[in-house]
Amino acid sequence: MSITTRGAAAPTSGLQNHGTLDTTSLDLAVAEVAAQALNWAATSPLKRADLLSRMARDTYAVAEDWAAAGCAAKGLDPQSSEGGEELFSGVGTFLRMVQCFQTSMVDIAKKGRPQYPGPVSHKPNSRIAVQVLPASNFDKLLYAGITGEVWMEPGVSEDEVRATQAEVYRNPTAHAGVSLVLGAGNVGSLGPRDVLTKLFAEGKVVVLKANPVNDYLVPYWERAMAGLIEAGFLRIVSGGAAVGAYLTHHESIVDIHVTGSDKTVEAIVFGVGDDAAERKASNNPIITKPVSCELGNVSPVVIVPGVWSKKDIDYQAAHVATMLTNNAGFNCLTPRVLVTHEQWSQRGEFLAALATVLESLPTRRAYYPGARERHASFMAAHPEATLIGTATDEALPWTIITGLDAGNVDDMCLNVEAFCSLTSECTISAHSPTEFVEKAVTFCNDVVWGTLSATVIAHPSSLQDASVGPAIEQAIADLRYGSIGLNLWHAMSFAFATTVWGAYPGHELTDIQSGRGFVGNAFLFARPQKSVVRGPFRSSPAPAWFATNRGAATTMRRLLAFEAKPSWLKIPGLLAAALKA
């Protein structure tokens, strides 16, 4: 089946037009980090750990200002639950990643490789899965009931996993060079996280170009990563597409990482204008240096039918509503299609509960460029969509398009990333829950666009069923996505950092879809295939990151203080805040 590859629209004009650009400062930034590439290669793991320890302190010192700037840009109250979300995703996930890499650096210094917790289990198709969460006793308490695994490519043994961990540290000089990171514009932690991956996982010094949408964060990033900047291992620059274009072609840049749109990557690799399509069709790139990227996705959420109580339905409605409303829907990991069983007797009840939760949540500023145009294009295709909440000059309503036909593979809801406050629901007809799960896997793999992330929601009774349970486990094995959540939003794979985050391996540049390569990966695995995170079907209390938890800001501040300097003395206050959230 041939599916048109179309991700979220992104401005690409000017990607090759830098004739009038003053490049002096850009050349200087590249030259300064290039001069330190071998010094970085010679920096011992313990000294890198020291840099990370400082980074944790500096990040915590700037966290409130950083988050407040993000809230101001997105129209959020820093003391609200939405403000807590910005503190967690915009700053906290970066801080956790800093700490995870710091632990790995110490492990490398002492034992030659990062020490993953395990166990290691065998999976279908000659794969093994390494458990990477909980990674500490703190994780066991703070994330009770949650586990994370990294699945390896077929044929990789545990001996090979250990032998190939942290390969860059065996001959760091061979990996030295300058990486260009083209940062994302939606989440404040993404650019800095990509910097960490390039420096500490791949051994490169970095020039980070901020996205114009959030380049207001550069002063806060400079304070958080001051240690790297002072040592000459990092430079941060701003500017539009012309700046990015100049840097991608710079002779001293050895590789490129992009977080954004597949359209941007295509423009970088194959150019723009009349000849670009021909160059793509003939696989004749204008950029030949390595390009890694984390791009968009029409993220599916597969809801396995079962007998759910009202509390079950309300909880999962809040779970899915959180997935949609987080960051106003401007995430590559926002669910864009809910996959339901047409014959599920509680389908209508669940959709009604989801609408009720969304009605209780304020609409948000549509801050990302092009959001209104994208929303309008979906409304034109689906005028029957349900609009929820108050739309204003700044805010778009929460939008749900229900009852899609799984056989209509050309429906834009299935192959265009909305990248706004919109999701859809598609029904699949099946004679049994087991058949539904099997059909849902085929649908997600072969019809829905992208391979970044997916979630499966299943009641404990379904998981324990002699037929349905094995079908769900097989689905986890068969889904071709880089991160999969079972009863836990796949975004947590991004947040934990010990897991890996990126598209399912195998995309060529001519069909890039959700990208290539992984970020995160604090245990420095050489051949990961995907991450799988699992959580309880219902938690009590609900996680602080749920949009319905009004005390999230307090909890997130205490979690941030804990991540900055973990201590058992901070646990009681953190747990008390979580219980009140």
Image (spheres, rainbow, N blue to C red):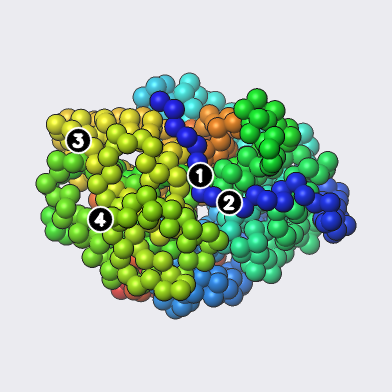
Q: The residue tagged with tag 3: helix, strand or loop?
A: loop
Residue neighbourhood size for the residue with mark 1, other residues' Cα within 10 Å, grouped as few (<14), some (14–19), many (≥20): many
Indicate which label's residue lies in the foreground, 1 or 4. 1
**CA–CA distance in space, label 2 to label 4:** 32 Å
Task: Tell me if label 2 and label 1 are in contact, CB under 8 Å.
Answer: yes
Q: Which mark is residue 429?
A: 3
**CA–CA distance in space, label 3 to label 4:** 22 Å
Which three-letter amino acid code belongs to the residue tagged 2? Ala
Q: The residue tagged with tag 2: helix, strand or loop?
A: loop
Task: Tell me if label 3 and label 4 are in contact, CB under 8 Å.
Answer: no
Residue drawn where x is 61% and y is 72% of the image = 62
Indicate which label's residue lies in the foreground, 2 or 4. 2
Q: Position of residue 352 (x, y in %)?
A: 20, 59
* Residue highlighted by disc 1: 7
Measured along the vertical axis of the image, is residue 341 above or below residue 144?
A: above
Task: Indicate left or right for 484 with 436 as reference.
Answer: right
Figure quadrant of the N terminus: top left
Residue neighbourhood size for the residue with mark 2, other residues' Cα within 10 Å, grouped as few (<14), some (14–19), many (≥20): some
* Residue highlighted by disc 2: 10
Task: Tell me if label 1 and label 4 are in contact, CB under 8 Å.
Answer: no
**CA–CA distance in space, label 3 to label 1:** 27 Å
Q: Earlier in the sequence, mark 2 or mark 4?
A: 2
Q: Is residue 150 visible?
A: no
Q: Position of residue 572 (x, y in %)?
A: 37, 70
**CA–CA distance in space, label 3 to label 2:** 35 Å
Which three-letter amino acid code belongs to the residue tagged 4? Gln
Which three-letter amino acid code belongs to the residue tagged 3? Ser
Q: Which mark is residue 81?
A: none
